[in-house]
Amino acid sequence: MTPDDIAARMNGRIDPVGPGRAEAFLSSPVVHNHAAFLQFLPDGTLACTWFGGTLEGRSDIFVHAAMLAPGAEAWSAATQVSDDADRSEQNPVIFADPADGTILLFHTAQPGGRQEDCEVRRRPLTLSSEGLEGGPAVSLPLPRG
């Protein structure tokens, strides 16, 4: 598959590709995308988060998310759920509490290219008609790096 073939299929639509198998190419607003994480949310929606930007490690790397609602035939458009323009925000993990519906995003954040100054952050996520929306980040009291 060529890059043009891939780009043409990045529409989020779920397409059957064989008996009992289907696939979807999620759309993304950026050229480099990495480290996808899947998590079912309390309402049954499947969330996919990843980080992307111009190049891994640069400070224009943000966490993005797309949603697949129960019974949907396509993934939602991607939304950006992190927002620190001074750090490369990477390695997203979602925790969805089934007891109270709380959705939290955990991710790393480092100054461009400086992993030794990496910190782990937590931010609340809310599900809206637009997709997932990120709240304010809190840096966790963990050693850096």
Image (spheres, rainbow, N blue to C red):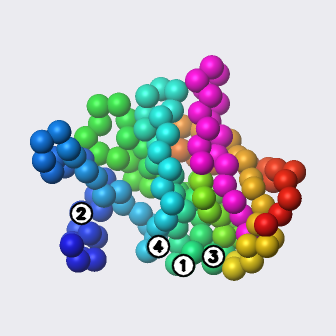
Q: Is residue 29 magenta?
A: no
Under mark 2, the amino acid is Arg
Query: For the residue carrying disc 1, how many other residues have a C-alpha within 10 Å: few (<14), some (14-19), or many (20+)?
Result: some
Residue 135 visible to the viewer? no
Residue 41: give x, y in percent of width and height.
51, 32
The residue that mark 3 highlights is: 57
Under mark 1, the amino acid is Leu
Query: For the residue carrying disc 2, how many other residues have a C-alpha within 10 Å: few (<14), some (14-19), or many (20+)?
Result: some
What segment carries the magenta color? 93-110
Residue 2 visible to the viewer? yes
Q: Which circle's residue, 4 or 3, is located before the other in the chain?
A: 4
Residue 111: give x, y in percent of width and height.
75, 74
Under mark 4, the amino acid is His
The residue that mark 1 highlights is: 55
Residue 32: numbered disc:
4
The alpha-carbon separation of the residues under discs 2 and 4 comes to 16 Å
**Tag 4 and tag 1, C-beta contact below 8 Å:** yes
The prevailing secondary structure element of the residues shown in magenta is strand
Residue 9: numbered disc:
2
Q: Secondary structure at mark 1?
A: loop
Under mark 3, the amino acid is Gly
Q: Residue extending furthest left?
A: 19
Q: Secondary structure at mark 4?
A: strand
Residue in the foreground of this view, choosing between 112 and 75 = 112
The alpha-carbon separation of the residues under discs 4 and 3 comes to 11 Å
The alpha-carbon separation of the residues under discs 2 and 1 comes to 22 Å
Q: Quadrant of the N terminus?
A: bottom left
Q: Is residue 106 magenta?
A: yes
